Amino acid sequence: MNVVETIEELRSARARLGVLGFVPTMGALHEGHLSLVRIAKQYARQVAVSIFVNPTQFGPREDFSKYPRPIEQDLDACRRAGVDLVFHPSPEQMYRPGLPQVVIDLPELTQPLEGRHRPGHFQGVCQVVAKLFNLMQPQYAIFGQKDFQQLRVIQAMTEALNFPITIVPGPTVRDPDGLAMSSRNQYLSPDERAPCLEHSTRAICRRSRSQSRRSSDQQAHRHHAANPPRPR
């Protein structure tokens, strides 16, 4: 496995590879990430992983400084998974001091939902993913469905900027208790995991009941339209 830290090293390493599947990550790898590597191997003989905690997608009061960075464990996991190339740059490599900031935004997709609560987050995601696509030049890039809004934003950005890359979604991988795997789950104590699951379950139940009511209303409307009352 080849591990590179500079853009020059990456370009040299990439030139020696053929059709490439790419899994962008911020590290702290878990089974969810490794499942994406396995999917990449179904599409390409060679697989690259990036490990970079991207500062531009964190807000001023978010956990950039605390975000887990177990790089040696991550590299071991990549080796065991059969990854061919790992790109582990510094922030200075990705964002050279003195250069102007480039902003990529798709407001229709980035402003609602999570974007409403994390202004600037998806602009940072688009910025770093576009840079990584330009540097890595993959034919396939694999993103988890756990972050569904992010997946949709990346799909739209790839199409809008004409990247010749196929975006492949990967199914959500869950812990035995049902919580979706996430690098940030290690912040949670066992007592904190239960409310997360309860909140998610209640939200799903509310959504299911709402959809069921809408479906019943639509069926009733169609029935009345097809069977209007007869005049007496």
Image: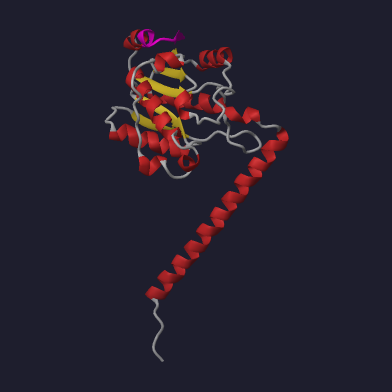
- The answer to whether residue 41 of the structure is visible from this angle is no
Identify the residue shown where x is 49% and y is 37%.
118
**Residue 30 % position (x, y):** 57, 24
Report the side of 188 relative to 119 (left or right): right
Pick whichever, 76 or 25, lies toward us: 25
**In which quarter of the view is residue 71 placed?**
top right
- Magenta stretch holds residue 6: yes
Q: Residue furthest left?
A: 162
Identify the residue shown where x is 36% and y is 16%.
98
Identify the residue shown where x is 58% and y is 35%.
180
Position of the C terminus by quadrant = bottom left
Q: Residue furthest bottom?
A: 232
Q: Which residues are magenta?
A: 1-10
**Residue 34 % position (x, y):** 52, 24
Identify the residue shown where x is 46% and y is 14%.
90
- The answer to whether residue 35 of the structure is visible from this angle is yes
**Residue 124 % position (x, y):** 42, 29
